[in-house]
Amino acid sequence: MSDELDLARGHVRRVLDAVDPEDLAMATPCSGWEVGRVLAHLADSADVVTRLLETGELTYTESARGEVSDPVGLARQRLAAMDAALSVAAPDRAAAARLPALVELTVHGWDVGVALDPAHRVPESLAAHVLSHVETVLVGEARGDRFAAPLAVPDDAPASDRLVAFLGRTPPA
């Protein structure tokens, strides 16, 4: 899964590189969430994965940091800390952290990417890989309130569209 994690890192970095300060207030596919808020959440998600690597416990919390003046910089900083923690983590913790990291990077990269460009898609091989995992893990109560109900898309839709629809997001037309 490290190759896929590298793909997810590259995907989110390309998206971060495309964000300009005036983009931070743009709406994302997440109702009520603008680009800056999703980027702050991505930073929080990186913190969650870092804590998992350090403590072995996966607990989702959202920071109460309020308005973030540089959400792109914050996301880059926290993602770098996550990468550093991943590079020195015990093998069992690294293995446990890979899927949450993969899902967060991929999905929030898509959220911001599609806000900037409605034609944005997750790279197909990455989307297919993430989808193959989340379809078996995020079932029933495991979805919690973190994901909306899956949306229907054609079976032959691109993997990117099937992934985001499975996670309750509407794929671009």
Image: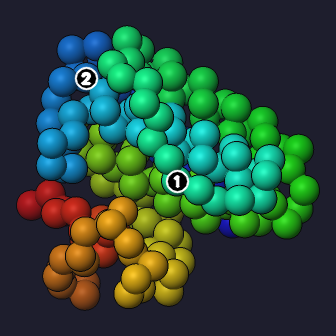
Is 118 left, or right, of 164 in this rendering? left
Q: Quadrant of residue 118?
A: top left
Q: Which of marks 1 and 2 precedes in the sequence? A: 2
Which quadrant holds the N terminus?
A: bottom right
Q: State how far apart marks 2 and 1 are (Cα).
A: 24 Å
Query: Which residue position is annotated with label 1?
Result: 60
Compared with 33, 52 (above or below) is below
User: In terms of depth relative to the viewer, which is nearer, 157 or 131?
Assistant: 131
Of tags 2 and 1, which is closer to the observer? 1
Residue depicted at 25% across the width and 69% down the height = 148
Residue in the image at 14% along x and 57% along y: 172
Q: Position of residue 15 (x, y in %)?
A: 39, 35
Residue 159 can be seen in this image: no
Amino acid type assigned to the residue bearing label 2 in the image = Leu
Secondary structure beneath dot 2 equals loop
Residue type (three-letter) at the residue carrying disc 1: Tyr
Dots 2, 1 in contact, CB < 8 A: no
Q: Nearer the viewer, residue 68 or 153?
A: 68
Give x and y (percent) for residue 7: 57, 52
